[in-house]
Amino acid sequence: GPKVEVELPPESRPETEPVPGVSEAGAADPAASKAKPDSKAGAKPDTEPPAAQPVPKKFYEQEEYDLITLNAANDNAILKVMPLLFADRRMPPESKRVGKIKVRLFDKQSEEYEVAWRHIEDIVFFEDLVLEEANKIVARAVAASGAGDVKKSQAAFDEAFDYFRLMLRKYPNTRGIQESIQEIGRASCRERV
């Protein structure tokens, strides 16, 4: 059938699906690698080699955003938007999904747009993306452990624990968090046996 109208200018629709973990906010700052050494008297010399790259941010250190997936009539476009202000950061029940919602695109935060609920297939909240990333790190830890690389496995478990500590502090009601915490507990116990 014909495309339905979503009140978004065509240039604001992404041409490709965004990759979790990669965002403009998380990109390395090229100016940071050209930082001048501290010239204060008595300052300690820089211990890092001059060619050292900036440490990449952890996924949860990025500026928060949510992802809205539009329906097939809108090419299943994925809109990266500023965090939506829904109660409990959950999708409202279907009976409440009427009319339009106001959104601000991540790349055009000063402009507000309206999207009709009938055009929205799914919404993925930032905390769901953080949990997904944490689960991937746990999987890497388990794989490294299975391959006999204890050092790599322990480093991945440590990183995953950082994610879960943040999740419990900042997003304790995220769907699936309790199951993921139980899984990392079981996996890390198997690692230590």
Image (tube, rainbow, N blue to C red):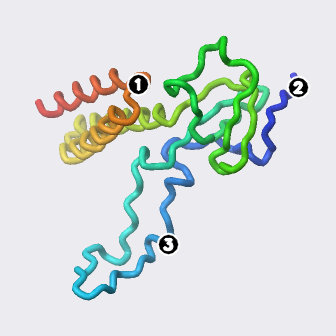
In the figure, is residue 91 to the left or right of 38?
A: right
* Residue at the image position 65 percent from the left and 50 percent from the top: 107
Q: Position of residue 2 (x, y in %)?
A: 88, 26
Q: In the orientation shown, which residue stands out farthest toward the top?
A: 95
Up-down relation of residue 161 to residue 45 (above or below): above
Up-down relation of residue 15 to residue 127 (above or below): below
Q: Nearer the viewer, mark 3 or mark 1?
A: 1
Count residues near mark 3 (Cα–Cα under 10 Å), then give few for <14, some for 14-19, many for 20+.
few
Q: In the orientation shown, which residue stands out farthest toward the left?
A: 193
Q: Nearer the viewer, residue 168 or 137?
A: 168
Instruction: Tell me which amino acid carries mark 1.
Output: Asn
Q: Earlier in the sequence, mark 2 or mark 1?
A: 2
Q: Quadrant of the rendered structure where residue 75 is? A: top right
Q: Nearer the viewer, mark 2 or mark 3?
A: 3
Q: Which secondary structure lies at badge 3?
A: helix
Rounded to the nearest angstrom, the CA distance separating label 2 from label 3 is 47 Å
* Residue at the image position 51 percent from the left and 41 percent from the top: 20
Q: Which residue is mark 2?
A: 2
Q: Quadrant of the rendered structure where residue 192 is? A: top left
Up-down relation of residue 41 to residue 58 (above or below): below
Q: Which residue is mark 1?
A: 173
Instruction: Tell me which amino acid carries mark 2.
Output: Pro
Q: Earlier in the sequence, mark 2 or mark 3?
A: 2
Q: Position of residue 41 (x, y in %)?
A: 26, 88
Q: Nearer the viewer, residue 10 or 102?
A: 102
